[in-house]
């Protein structure tokens, strides 16, 4: 049984509000050969006592203390301690579909070494959410680590960034690009909770600088592992950067801060597009509609109409998800 074990890595930090639901969603999995490695970053609320209460009931759950090192370090510690052949991730406020692990194992038994799921975005106490569809290439699989299950060997000599708060986008496309057989699971979701205290909800100039550092590291790794610098790669990088512009401008308090952030991101986008992809534009997207609407939004922000440009993009993101009834996990 050990050869088919899935090691699930969960960073935690002051997670008492949603942690029970998260752990229960793992315990209730229809596939039972798993271990849950919870790496705590120094919680000061009831997080530790909640975890210990579950450990008493289920010996598949382990707790590791990793105080003050951040989510990237927590995930790296979890990977190092993982005993399973396969690797999965979950955040401490999200939940799995009850067939999440089983859906992956069925495809693993057919030879897949990386399995990818669509994800369902929802808010607290809401019955409506958005299904976000993803692909199976390194460029369209979504750069979060948690909507995938991997053969652990794909992570050999690769690690999450421990210095940057944006820790996963620099490594996930590389890991997926290493896989020999990537498969997609239909109608089984990772449930992602939109947490109002998350980095993307409070993002300003520091996080905008963080995305630039993260993209520089991603490009370096893409070159190291000989990933193609094609139009799909250009689209990936542009669509990784641009949302940080929208969120950063939205969260900045003054027009001066908004302007500085706008100039920082747009100049970087143009530099990347020119130097790496030979594209003379400050935004690139394969889809013509998305390209036009984003350039309009950037123009509006460029002339100081920040609220209008942000509203255009947020409305576009809102309608781009597939609206559906909340599916109980």
Image (spheres, grey):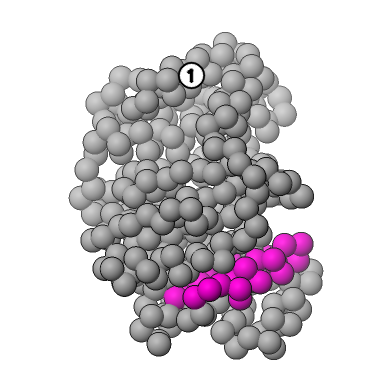
Please identify the quadrant where the C terminus is shown.
Answer: bottom right
Residue at coordinates 43% horizontally, 17% vertically from top-left?
292
Which residue is tagged 1? 293
Residue 258 is covered by the magenta coloring:
no
Identified at 61% across, 76% down, the residue is: 27
Residue 247 visible in image = yes
Residue 10 in the image: state x and y as whole percent.
57, 68
Asked if residue 47 is positioned above or below residue 228 in the image, the reply reads below
Q: Is residue 311 left or right of residue 237?
A: right
x%, y% of residue 100? 50, 64
Horizontal arrangement in the rendering, residue 177 relative to residue 309 (left or right) = left
In the image, 78 versus 50, the foreground residue is 50
Q: Position of residue 73 (x, y in %)?
A: 52, 66
Q: In the picture shown, does residue 113 fall above or below 291?
A: below
Of 199 and 100, nearer the camera is: 100
Residue 62 appears at what percent x and percent y? 59, 82
The residue nearer to you, when weighing 101 against 145, is 101
């Amino acid at each position: 049984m050990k050869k088919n074990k899935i090691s699930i890595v969960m960073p935690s930090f002051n997670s008492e509000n949603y942690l029970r639901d998260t752990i229960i969603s793992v315990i209730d999995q229809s596939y039972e050969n798993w271990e849950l490695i919870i790496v705590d970053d120094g919680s000061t609320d009831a997080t530790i006592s909640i975890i210990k209460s579950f450990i008493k009931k289920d010996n598949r759950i382990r707790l590791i203390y990793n105080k003050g090192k951040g989510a990237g370090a927590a995930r790296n510690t979890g990977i190092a301690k993982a005993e399973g052949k396969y690797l999965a991730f979950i955040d401490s406020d999200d939940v799995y579909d009850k067939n999440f692990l089983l859906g992956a194992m069925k495809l693993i038994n057919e030879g897949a070494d990386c399995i990818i799921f669509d994800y369902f975005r929802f808010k607290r106490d809401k019955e409506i959410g958005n299904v976000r569809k993803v692909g199976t290439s390194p460029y369209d699989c979504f750069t979060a680590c948690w909507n995938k299950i991997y053969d652990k060997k794909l992570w050999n000599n690769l690690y999450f960034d421990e210095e940057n708060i944006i820790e996963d986008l620099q490594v996930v496309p590389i890991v997926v690009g290493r896989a020999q057989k990537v498969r997609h699971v239909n109608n089984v979701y990772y449930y992602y909770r939109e947490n109002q205290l998350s980095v993307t909800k409070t993002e300003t100039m520091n996080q905008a600088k963080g995305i630039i550092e993260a993209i520089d590291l991603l490009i370096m790794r893409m070159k190291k592992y000989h990933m193609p610098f094609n139009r799909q790669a250009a689209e990936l990088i542009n669509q990784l950067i641009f949302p940080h512009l929208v969120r950063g401008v939205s969260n900045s308090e003054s027009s001066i801060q908004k302007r500085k952030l706008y100039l920082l991101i747009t100049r970087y986008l143009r530099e990347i597009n020119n130097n790496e992809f030979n594209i003379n534009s400050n935004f690139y997207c394969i889809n013509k509609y998305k390209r036009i609407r984003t350039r309009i939004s950037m123009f509006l922000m460029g002339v100081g109409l920040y609220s209008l440009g942000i509203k255009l993009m947020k409305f576009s993101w809102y309608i781009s998800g597939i609206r559906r009834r909340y599916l109980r996990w």
